[in-house]
Amino acid sequence: MKKPLGRNPAILLEKIKESLDRLNEKMEVFIEIQKGKKQDFVMQDLPEALDVMTLLSLPDHLRKTAVTICKLGRATAEEVSEHTKRARAVESGYLNQLVLMGYLKKERKGRKAYFFVEK
């Protein structure tokens, strides 16, 4: 015998709506990424460490930084910040987060730190 869905179907419907909203947000990101293809950014060229599903699993702020690094290939926090229109210090923090998470590599040359995805 199956259990009834609950006494309050409004709660169940609200949970379904929340799930659909989250799914819709992820689809919007996917559409944005697909639009990026037209700007010489091909998803098949993504390194395995940053495939589409990985990008979709990242929070929006980190995803924007990761996609920018994929486009640029190898860049400093300053170069990334020029593309994302966010402060260099903010990008530096996000890039270092992505390094700690294992998605990016970091290499120092003199005083500059370069971030990249290892292919």
Image (spheres, helix red, strand yellow):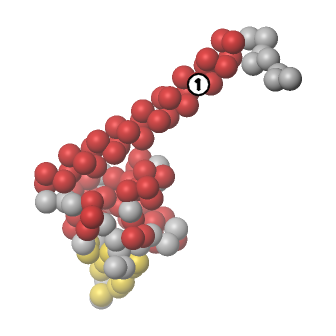
Task: Quarter of the image for the N terminus: give it.
Answer: top right
Residue shown at the point (34%, 79%) measured from the top left: 119
Can the viewer see residue 62 in this picture?
Answer: no
The quarter of the displayed image where residue 105 is located: bottom left
**48 vs 80: above or below:** below
**Residue at the limit of the structure toward the left, as seen here:** 39
Out of 27 and 90, give the one closest to the viewer. Answer: 27
**38 vs 47: above or below:** above
Can the viewer see residue 106 in this picture?
Answer: yes
Left or right: where 83 falls relative to 26: left
- Residue at mark 1: 16
Q: Give the percent coordinates (x, y) of residue 73.
A: 24, 72
Out of 5 and 16, give the one closest to the viewer. Answer: 5
Residue shown at the point (69%, 12%) measured from the top left: 9
Left or right: where 20 falls relative to 95: right
**Amino acid type assigned to the residue bearing label 1 in the image:** Ile
